[in-house]
Amino acid sequence: MKIAQKLGLTDEIFSRMVVKTKMLFSNVLGHAGELHYEKYLKKHKIDFIKAETDNHYDYIIGGKKEQVKRWESAGTNDKFLAINLTQTHGDRSGVGNFYHKESFDKLVAFDVLFKNFKIININEIETNKRFDDYIVGKHKINRDDTNLLDSEQKEFLELIKVKNKEYPDALEKYKSKLKISYLNILTRACNLAPNEIDSLFTYENFRLVTGAKGFAAEEHFNVLLENKKLSYIQDKDMYSKVDHWVGKHRVQVKIPNLRAVTQEKWAFKTHKSHGSGVKELYTNDEFDYVALFIGFEMNEEIDKYLPIAVQNKFLIIPTKNLLEHPKYPGYLKRVSSFNKDQYKVNDLSLLN
C-alpha cells in the first residue's frame, strides 16, 4: 500500500496500526462509507457533486444534500441499525453537538461491513428533545427481511463493540479464530481492496492523514525503544493521555505542527482534538515526557500532508520544560515550541 510506504511502515504493520487503534479505525470506516456510495452512484450513472471538507453534508444529488454515515457500533444489533448523528468537529458542547434540520436533506446509512445501505429523508429523523431546530444524536432503523445481519457481520460487530482496554485482546482472538492477517481484517472491515483504502488518504481527508501520521509515529517509537533495548508498554486505553510507559515514565508521542514550525524552532500541539477553552487543554501533569517524531521529511510542493521520506528520529522533551497556558494556570499552552538545537536526536537517557 502506498500510504504504508509513505509512512515508513509495511502493509501489515500499517494495517495493524489502523485496526488496533479504534479512533483511527473509526475514521477510516467513515471515509470508506463515502467511497462505497460514490462507487454505487458511478455504477448507476447518477450525477453527483462532492461537498468540500467540513460541510454538514457529503454530496449534492438532484439538488438535495446527502450525508453519508456508517453504522454506530454500540447501538447496532439484530433489531436496529443505529447511526450516530453527532458532529465530529468543532465545539461539541450543547447545540454544537448536533445537526440542524437544514444541514442535509437525506441520510445515507451504511450497515455493518458496508454490505447494504438505507436512504432516509431528514424529516423521518426525530427532533432533538433539547433543541427544537436540530435532530437527535442517534437514529435507529428497524430491521426487516431486507437488512438482517449475516454471520460475518455479527462476528465483526461483536468485535467492534468491545470497549477500550479489552479491545486489543478481542482483536487478537478474532484474528486467530479466522486465521487472517491484519491487512485482511482491514480490507474485510472496509469491504475494499488495498488500493481503494489507499485512495482514502488524500488531501481532502487531511484529518485522516494527520491521524495516521500520529499513530505511525507511535509505531516508529516502538522500534526506537526496541533498538535501544528499553522495555515499554503501550497504553491500551484509547482515552489515555499516555501513549507509552517506559519504566515509570509516562510518554506521549507527538508529530510537529507544521504550521508553527520555523527554520529555528520545532513546534507541536499540546491540546486535545475536541472541546473548547480550558476543556481543550492538557494539564501539566498528565504525562512526563513528549516523544516528538521529527522523522517525516516534508516537501509541501510535492505533498502538503504526506512525507517524501522517513527516518526514525525523535526528540525527548520533559513536560516540565513546556510553558503553561497564559490564561489557565496548571494547563499547557495550545502549541509548544523550542529551539531546534535544544535536544539531541534519539537521546533516550532521560527514560533510562
Image: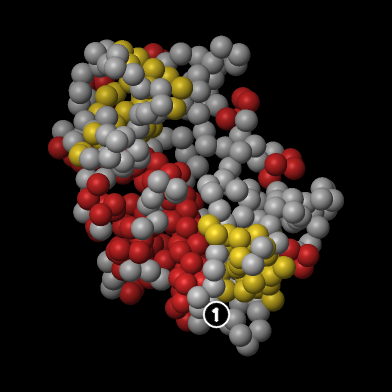
Task: Residue lying at the far bottom in this picture: please name it.
Answer: 145
Residue 48 is situated, as x and y percent measured from the top left of the image, at 55, 64
Say left or right for 23 vs 100.
Answer: left
The residue that disc 1 covers is 149
The quarter of the displayed image where residue 58 is located = bottom right
| Residue 114 appearing in the image | no
Q: How is the image coloured?
A: secondary structure
Above or below — where is 220 with respect to 67?
Answer: above
State the residue at coordinates (77%, 51%).
134
The quarter of the displayed image where residue 294 is located = top left
Above or below — where is 17 with respect to 244?
Answer: below
Quadrant where the C terminus is found in the figure: top left
State the residue at coordinates (29%, 36%).
301
Residue 135 is situated, as x and y percent measured from the top left of the image, at 76, 55
What amino acid does circle 1 point to?
Leu
State the residue at coordinates (45%, 44%).
207
Say left or right for 306 vs 152.
Answer: left
| Residue 264 appearing in the image | yes
- Other-residue count near label 1 (Cα within 10 Å), few / some / many at <14 / 14–19 / ≥20: many
Above or below — where is 348 with respect to 16?
Answer: above
How many labels were placed on the picture? 1
Quadrant where the N terminus is found in the figure: bottom left
Residue 11 is situated, as x and y percent measured from the top left of the image, at 24, 57
Residue 271 is situated, as x and y percent measured from the top left of the image, at 50, 29
State the residue at coordinates (40%, 46%).
203
**Front one among 228 and 336:** 336
Above or below — where is 61 with respect to 94?
Answer: below
Q: Secondary structure at mark 1?
A: loop
